[in-house]
Image (cartoon, rainbow, N blue to C red):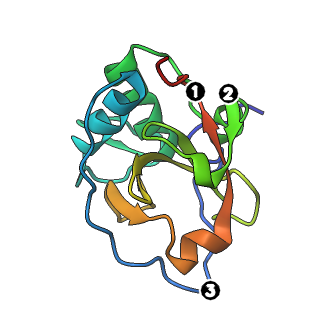
Amino acid sequence: MLLTGCAGQPARLPEVEAEPAAAAAPIVNASDEASSVALQALAYLGTPYRTGGLSPQTGFDCSGLVAYAYRQGAGLALPRNTFDLSHLGQAVRRSELRPGDLVFYNTQRREYSHVGIYLGENRFIHAPASGGEVRVENLRANYWMRRYSGARRVIAPPG
């Protein structure tokens, strides 16, 4: 079975609690390629969520936003599903996150079912769900802390 989109399944299971309100975007300086990816993703704030969405014109799902931002910001072609994305690069501890790192969450009762791009200052950007739009979240909000699956660094830091 071919997996596409955020988790490979368009339907989301109901959550027992609502996601927290969107957070304010941090300041991101594009001093390297990974930061350029984070800055690129910020350009799509407010873009509507769409299952299978791949561009600002069609809307984004979570992995579509990641793939598009990496293609535009770093010229990299990334996989289009969270499972494959969760195997890229190297694992990163939450305390060592840098802008451009991928952050993964369990939002469909399985690890790595959702992905976003870390921005810095404990914030990440993602395409949340049907009816939502690309927005910034606080990594430390209880909702996201409980669902955190891990992080991956696709672009090595300069130096």
Residue 107: percent from left, percent from top: 63, 64
Are the residues at dot 3 and dot 1 in contact (C-beta closer than 8 Å)?
A: no
* Residue type at numbered disc 1: Val
Residue in the foreground of this view, choosing between 21 and 53: 21
Classify 10 Å Cα crowding around label 3: few (below 14), some (14-19), many (20 and above): few
Secondary structure of the residue carrying tag 2 is loop
Q: In this view, does 159 lie above or below 154?
A: above
Residue visible at 59% across and 26% down? Answer: 79
Residue visible at 29% across and 53% down? Answer: 48
Please give the label number shown on residue 41.
none
Residue that carries the numbered disc 1 in the rendered image: 154
Classify 10 Å Cα crowding around label 2: few (below 14), some (14-19), many (20 and above): some
* Residue type at numbered disc 3: Val
CA gap between label 3 and label 1 equals 32 Å
Is 68 on the left-hand or right-hand side of 151?
left
Q: In the orientation shown, which residue stands out farthest toward the top? A: 75
Secondary structure of the residue carrying tag 1 is loop
Residue that carries the numbered disc 3 in the rendered image: 16
Rendered-image quadrant of the N terminus: top right
Residue that carries the numbered disc 2 in the rendered image: 88
Asked whether the viewer can see residue 6, the reply is: no
Nearer to us of marks 2 and 3 is 2
Are the residues at dot 2 and dot 1 in contact (C-beta closer than 8 Å)?
A: yes
Residue visible at 27% across and 43% down? Answer: 28
User: Closer to the N terminus: mark 2 or mark 3?
Assistant: 3
CA gap between label 2 and label 1 equals 6 Å
Is 32 on the left-hand or right-hand side of 61?
left
Residue 14: percent from left, percent from top: 61, 77
User: Closer to the N terminus: mark 2 or mark 1?
Assistant: 2
Secondary structure of the residue carrying tag 3 is loop
* Residue type at numbered disc 2: Leu
Asked whether the viewer can see residue 52, the reply is: yes
